[in-house]
Amino acid sequence: MLAAGRRRRLAPVDESKQDAGFGVFLTALRVVARNRDAAGLQKLCAVDVITGIDAPPGPAELARKMQAGGWVQLQTVLEFGAARYEKGFVLPYLFGKFPEDLDAIEHVVTIRSGAVLRAAGREDAAVVCPLDYDILKVEDARPVNGWVRAARLDGPRGWVAGTDIRSTGAERIFIEKNGGVWKITAWASGA
């Protein structure tokens, strides 16, 4: 049973404007993603870009992953703000700003204002409470017809639409300066 605590939120942030050069890089990356430009993507990568656990590193491997269905995930990641992270930035901001005292595997973040927790996993079920970028504890990670059983940290329980939440373990991209130039240094998914 989840002990009621205090309600916690993780509102969107975008720290990309803190560095004009990074903003230019991000614009170029968005164009590459929108055009599904594998060659352009490779030019934006560090030579040793990490492409996943137990996956070979390198720009060609990352381009291969994008060609195998990754473009949609990359475009989704680019819709979220960037957060400063270690020597560079990470997108989405959720990964860089998630509270260290919470288990990232057991929690998700509501990614839009106006989302709601419902009494049952369906659109016409009664609203238990509003959600406004709330951090939720997942009670059962297995979605049921697109709904996830979760609880707000201050106690209310119910069901949230899977499209209204995101895990910090979902796809993310790390970008750092490499030889004075912004480069993609890692693409990851999974906790």
Image: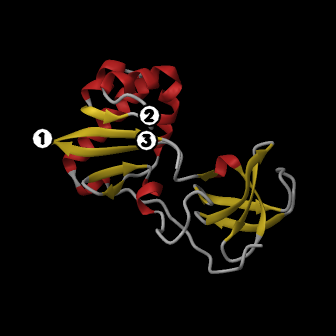
Residue 92 in percent (x, y) is at 44, 50
Furthest toward the left, the residue is 179
Decide which of 130, 108 is in the foreground and name it. Answer: 108
Residue count near mark 2 (Cα–Cα under 10 Å), binned few <14, some 14–19, many ≥20: few
Residue position marked by numbered label 1 in the rendering = 179
In the visual, does 2 lie left or right of 180?
right
Residue at point 12%, 40% (across, down):
179
Give the residue at mark 3. Answer: 78
| Between marks 3 and 1 in the image, the one whose residue lies nearer the viewer | 1
Question: Which element is circle 3 on?
Answer: helix
Pointer 3 or 1: first along the chain: 3
Q: Nearer the viewer, residue 19 or 98?
A: 98
| Residue furthest to the front | 54
For residue 57, what is the image quadrant? top left
Callout 3–callout 2 Cβ contact below 8 Å: no
> Which mark lies nearer to you, 1 or 2?
2
Amino acid found under the numbered disc labelled 2: Asp
Seen in the picture, residue 191 relative to 104 is either above or below; the reply is above
**C-alpha distance separating marks 3 and 1:** 24 Å
The colour scheme is secondary structure
Disc 2, SS: loop
**Mark 3: amino acid:** Leu
N-terminal label among 1 and 2: 2
Question: What's the amino acid at mark 1?
Answer: Gly
Binning the other alpha carbons within 10 Å of mark 3 as few (below 14), some (14 to 19) or many (20 upward) gives many
Q: Quadrant of the N terminus?
A: bottom right
Q: In whole angstroms, how far apart are the C-alphas of marks 1 and 2? A: 26 Å
Q: Is residue 55 above or below residue 104?
A: above
**Residue drawn at x 30%, y 23% as measured from the top left:** 40
Residue 54 circle label: 2
Could you tell whether 97 is left or right of 168 in the image?
left
